[in-house]
Image (cartoon, rainbow, N blue to C red):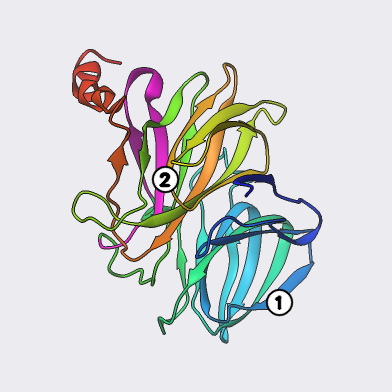
Amino acid sequence: MSYFVNVPTQNGLNKLPSNACKLLDFQLLSLAAGESYQGNSGDREVLAVILGGKGSFEVNGRSFAKVGGRPNVFAGKPYSVYIPCDAEYAIVADGRLEVGLCSAPSDLKTEPYVIGPDLVTSGVWGAANFSRNFHQILTGSSQPDLPAARLIVGETYTPSGNWSTYPPHKHEADDLPREAYHEEMYFFKVNPGDGFGLTRFYNDEVDTGYIVRDNTILMMPNGYHTVVSAPGYTTYYLWFLAGNHRMQAVTEDANVGWVSKTVAMLKDLGH
C-alpha cells in the first residue's frame, strides 16, 4: 500500500493516483482565468480551500462571488467554501486559481457557506526547534456556526529546520477522552519551491520516511507521523481529518512524548 504520492498538477481537476484512506479524499483543482469546473458532491461533504487566487462559487443556487485573495499558501490566511452533500456546484476562476478539495462521507443536510480569514484562528504550537505556525479553518465544536459532519481542516507552516507534529502522535482508536479515531492527510507545499522536507510515518506494519516536495501528499489511515523542514525552507501542509467525532484527541509516541512536557519551560525561556 502506498501512503505517499505525488498529486498531479495538470490544468483542471487532479485526482489522487491512489488512496490509502477509506473516508478521506483529496482533489486539486487548477484553473486558468475564466475557466470553470462543475461538480456534484454526492454523498460527501467538501471543503474547498483556496490555495491561491480567487474564484466565484455557485452551490445549490447560492452564489459566492470572488472568494479568495492570497496569491499562494505562504501569503496569508485562506478563504474556504463548504459544499454540503448532494450539492450541485460550479467554480469559475477569476485569474489563476488553485483549490484543494478535501472531502469525507456525509449525510448532513445544511447550507453552503464561506469561511473567511476572519474566522480562521492562528497561533503557534510547540516551542524551540519544534515550534510551528497554524491556521485552524474548520475544527468542530468551537465553531457552532460552521456545521460539518466529519471534516476537520487546518494548515501548518513548519519553519526552516524545525519539526512539526512533534512529538509524533496517532489517532487510530476511539478511546475517549484519551484518543479519537481519525484518518488524516497532509498535502504539502514548500517555499522556495525547489526545497524539501522529510516526513516519518510508522505503525505496526511500516516504519518509513518520505521526501516532502511541492504537491506531495501523505495519507494516514492510522499510525504515528511527524514532519521536518530542511534548513532554508518552509514546509506547508493542508491537514484534514475525518472519523467518528469532530473533536481531536491524540496519543503521543511514548518514547518521545516527554518532549511535550518541556514546552512551557522553553517558552518561559523565550524559545
* Residue 166 to residue 185: above or below: above
How crowded pointer 1 is (Cα within 10 Å; few <14, some 14-19, many 20+) is rated as few
**What's the distance in space between the residues labelled 2 and 1, CA to CA?**
28 Å
Q: Position of residue 121 (x, y in %)?
A: 35, 48
Number of numbered discs overlaid on the protein picture: 2
Q: Is residue 183 above or below residue 6?
A: below
Where is mark 2, residue-wise? 135
Q: Is residue 205 above or below residue 150?
A: above
Sequence-wise, which precedes: disc 2 or disc 1? 1
Question: Is 78 a magenta residue?
Answer: no
Residue depicted at 48% across the width and 49% down the height? 239
> Looking at the image, which residue is at 40% across and 18% down?
129
The image quadrant that residue 15 belongs to is: bottom right
Percent x, y of residue 148: 39, 71
Q: Residue at x 62, y 57 (%)?
A: 19
**Left or right side of 132 for 32:** right
User: What secondary structure is found at the residue carrying circle 1?
Assistant: strand
Q: Quadrant of residue 262?
A: top left
Residue 53 is marked as none
Magenta-highlighted residues: 121-141
The residue beneath circle 1 is: 38
Query: Which amino acid lies under the numbered mark 2 shown in the image of this protein?
Result: His
Q: Residue at x 28, y 42 (%)?
A: 251
Amino acid under label 1? Gln
